[in-house]
Image (tube, rainbow, N blue to C red):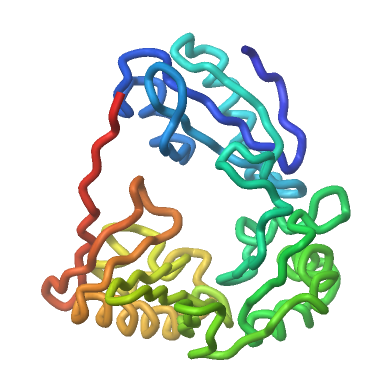
Amino acid sequence: MRIEALEPHQVFVFGSNASGHHGAGAARMAHERFGAVWGEGHGLHGQSYAIDTMSGLPTIEREVQAFLAFAAEQPELELLVTEIGCGIAGYTPEQVDVVVLSHFHPDHIGGLMTDGAPTFANARYVTGAQEYNFWSKMEAGNRVGDLVASNVTPLAEKTEFIEDGASVAPGVTAMAAFGHTPGHMVYHLESGERRLVLTADLANHYVWSFAHPEWIVSFDSDKEAATASRRKVLGMLAADRVPMIGYHMPFPAAGFVETRGEGFRFVPVSYQLMG
């Protein structure tokens, strides 16, 4: 199926129909070059991959068009376009009870609204008070501030603005990790004796952000605060042997943290994809 373009708030899901291995040529290139992520798939080879799109983001739109041009030349790939939240993962937007936001960069809040209405109509929202207080005061013309005004502020009456250590839901606790943005939060999940931390954008690179916490990515707004947050959270994860899931990291993006020299090392969990 050849796809010429995507509408805002659509996701294209594509599957490898070749060898049944996630390292198959076109699928591997899609991951390495375009950030496609793979998960539990469906069909003969049990694989699916996805890249989502957001409106009003020229960089993302350019990447999408580049991928479409690439995909059109790959007979290995089968493509399907679907609406975000259509239930392909087993849930519909109406079934979502709580939406928890780590921070307000566009790739984290771009899907909160669909055609001017809340995407998750029945949900309540939770986010850091410091994050909202900063971005909501931006003057018109600020890229992030404008998106907060259109996608977050209309939801303010349904939003709980929290501080460090707040309980989001039973077993879910907010942890301040400021620096990537002024109010960036990570979330600690606990069930019985099991623990997990969603580190969000704390460490954007799975090697350098761990080995050298003082090295920043261009999107870190406060170098010193981001460095301090990485050292604090990564140090806790390493000391307590708590697993983590990080955003913008290679699949499976889940693993453990070990100390190494003056920094850390990310050790991904092992996995096996069954054909």
122 relative to 78, above or below: below
The residue positioned 40% from the left and 16% from the top of the image is 44
| Numbered disc total | 0
Q: Nearer the viewer, residue 91 or 197?
A: 91
Indicate the quadrant containing the N terminus: top left, top right, bottom left or bottom right: top right
Residue 84 point in image, percent of width and height? 67, 42
Residue 268 point in image, percent of width and height? 24, 54
227 relative to 7, above or below: below
Residue 235 point in image, percent of width and height? 25, 81
Q: Nearer the viewer, residue 207 or 53?
A: 53
Q: Residue 256 occupies which quadrant of the picture?
A: bottom left
The residue positioned 52% from the left and 65% from the top of the image is 219
Indicate the quadrant containing the C terminus: top left, top right, bottom left or bottom right: top left
As drawn, the residue found furthest toward the front would be 192
Q: Residue 131 occupies which quadrant of the picture?
A: bottom right
The residue positioned 35% from the left and 53% from the top of the image is 253
Q: Nearer the viewer, residue 55 or 246?
A: 246
Residue 2 point in image, percent of width and height? 64, 13
